[in-house]
Amino acid sequence: MAFNLYRAESTKISKHISVHTQQGQIEYRLAGIIYFGGFHFTCRIISADNHIWCNDGRDMGSRCESQGTLKAMETHMLKTMGNRNVSVAIYVRIDDQ
């Protein structure tokens, strides 16, 4: 599930979201964030074990840099990466339901 958050300064990024359906509640975890600024996109990728990796393809090529864990990062810090602002938040379904 992806949410367009471009120009959403007051929007908060959640590490987890719940969706209520006829089959019950479905849980999703934050899996990636895309940022825009400086005329190109950058991203953070959050692995299943909640480790954060960042990539700026223009400056880093195919190499990703570790930024610790999602648990250790405060949610307000997820809205920016350097001078770039959040554009899209990507969530994946948690399978152990």
Image (tube, rainbow, N blue to C red):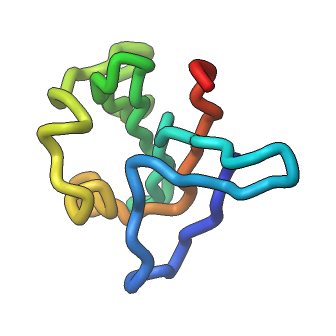
Q: Nearer the viewer, residue 56 or 7?
A: 7
x and y percentages locating residue 57 in the rendered image? 44, 29
Q: Nearer the viewer, residue 82 or 67?
A: 67
Q: Is residue 65 above or below residue 83?
A: above
x and y percentages locating residue 55 in the rendered image? 37, 30
Specify the quadrant of the image occupied by residue 91: top right
Left or right: 39 in relation to 96: left
Q: Residue furthest bottom?
A: 10
x and y percentages locating residue 66 in the rendered image? 21, 22
Q: Is residue 44 above or below residue 19?
A: above
Left or right: 11 in relation to 84: right
x and y percentages locating residue 82 in the rendered image? 22, 55
Q: Residue furthest right?
A: 22
Q: Which residue occupies 45% across, 48% down?
A: 16
Q: How many marks?
A: 0
Q: Which residue occupies 27% across, 53% down?
A: 81
Q: Nearer the viewer, residue 8 or 15?
A: 15
Q: Which residue occupies 23% across, 65% down?
A: 76
Left or right: 94 in relation to 15: right
Q: Which residue occupies 43% across, 62% down?
A: 86
Q: Quadrant of the C terminus?
A: top right
Q: Is residue 41 above or below residue 77?
A: above
